[in-house]
Amino acid sequence: MDRYALVIGGERIATSRFADVANPSTGAIVGRMPLATPADLDRAVQAAAAAFETWRLVPDAERAEACRRIAATIEAHAEELARLLTEEQGKPLNGLGSRFEIGGALAWTRHTADIELPVEVLQDGEAGRVELHRKPIGVTGSITPWNWPVMIACWHIIPAVRTGNTVVIKPSPMTPLSTIRLVELINEVLPAGVVNVVTGENEIGALMSSHPGIAKVSFTGSTPTGRKIMASAAATLKRLTLELGGNDAGIVLPDASPAEIAEGLFWSAFINNGQTCAALKRLYVHDSIYDAVCDELAAYARKVVVGDGFAEDSVLGPVQNRMQFDIVSAYVDEARAKGARILTGGEPAGGQGYFYPVTLVADVDHGCRLVDNEQFGPALPIIRYHDVAEAVRKANDNAAGLGGSVWGRDLEQARRVASQLECGSVWINKHGAIQPNAPFGGVKQSGIGVEFGAEGLKEFTTIQTVFC
Ligand code: NAD
């Protein structure tokens, strides 16, 4: 069994303790995660701080070129990374699975390499010249979740190093191996210490968010953990980008065509088995087409193959871990007990692995956890509404505000409804379609700050205003 190592200061550092990482499809152990100690974290922060002294001075064009070389290395190892990802995360190699995720990591890396943040001249006249410069912050900490581990690692690492920062990344203990391998590859390109990885249980993340040597934390994960990080970052006034949980609503207007939107709706909700921050998690459908939308969705769902990630025909895999599997099961059971109608799925498959079938739940409303909370799994509640104002009110009746969508033929009307949704991104006739040039982030309790594009890059800089 492969024993992985930390990567600190460009070297593989062995630990004395390990934890097994299992394939969620089979339970088979796929590798051993090193358990970093607090002293290992200190060494990683020191290595990153030492590297910062030179990396911050490297000309911008060279840092851009280094990011392009990282992309080339990822591309050369794409299949290896995809297979490792399927082993530990469970998602299929095909469809919107591991190969797709590595493709996304590449696209974001390449795009971010090419973004410039030039000096802005705010004033240039007799009263003097005023310039706005952007400077790196220092050592950044990256804490990532288990749903899209490689792509999210790139969302944190690449903008950080592009702007002259250095990084200590701590992946989720559920999916650490692909991040370790990614950091090994990045270390073939970048100077020692610019990107370091420490792995371990949640405590290492907690230590990072209070560590005096870390100047900024990029965190992607759940809202409760985001709150803890914000609290423990306060003592050292760290900069924070928090990409947290969502409970995205989609509203299907009365003029939508059920047959035309069914496939889009399905993948909006079930991409990565629903384990996606900006997946569609609550669907509001007008009474006049409610039954037709339910029928079209159920017909599509019955054709979807759920299975081991390495099986050629699987388009969805297992739920990634026991905890999430239990949450999804409990939420569906509660909805059923309250009178909801299960259109497809609803019972765990049984046998090996955390397989939970694609589950559509009709005749359900607010007041049960499947609607009120983030289910983060393959179960979609479909809520009937009678007038659009009611749907908008219910869509906004949630503490989360990550994404939202409106589905209908009259695009002007759809845009008007979309503008009323309280969320950081809103889509018309699609959902969750993020891209590297468009800022992405949550409002309300879905986060603070944005990622992607120039706006995202700026979050890895501090402003220095120069008066001359
Ligand atoms: P999680 O919050 O349980 O864990 C995320 C990371 O935080 C892991 O690396 C974990 O080890 C670490 N962690 C746990 N406790 C910590 C603490 N006290 N201090 C510091 N770090 C700690 O989240 P998860 O279950 O891995 O991921 C699922 C959640 O992530 C969902 O809520 C999902 O919506 C959210 N998510 C959001 C986005 C986004 O962009 N908004 C993207 C992906 C996932």
Image: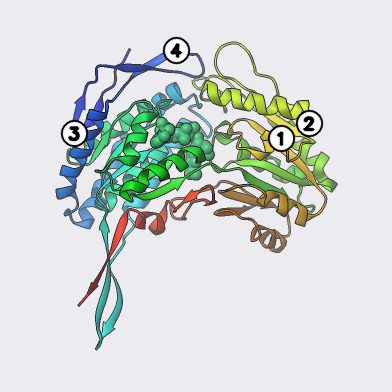
For the residues labelled 3 and 4, the Cα–Cα distance comes to 30 Å
Please name which of the two marks, 4 or 2, marks the residue nearer to the observer: 2
- Residue 288 location, x and y as percent? 85, 47
What's under tag 1, amino acid-wise? Cys
Left or right of 341 on screen, residue 439: left
Residue 332 locus on image (x, y percent): 69, 27
Q: Nearer the viewer, mark 1 or mark 2?
A: 1
Badge 2 element: loop
Mark identifier at residue 368:
1
Looking at this view, name the residue that lies furthest to the front. 235
Q: Which residue is mark 2?
A: 340
Q: Secondary structure at mark 4?
A: loop
Mark earlier in primary sequence (4, 2)? 4
Q: In front: 179, or 49?
A: 49
Mark 2 / mark 3, whichever is N-terminal: 3
Residue labelled with disc 3:
10
- Mark 1 or mark 2: name the one nearer the start of the chain: 2
Q: Position of residue 335 (x, y in %)?
A: 74, 30
Q: Amino acid at mark 2?
A: Ala
The amino acid type of the residue labelled 4 equals Ala
* Whole-number angstrom distance, CA of label 2 to CA of label 3: 55 Å
Mark 1 neighbour class, 10 Å CA radius: few under 14, some 14 to 19, many 20 or more:
some
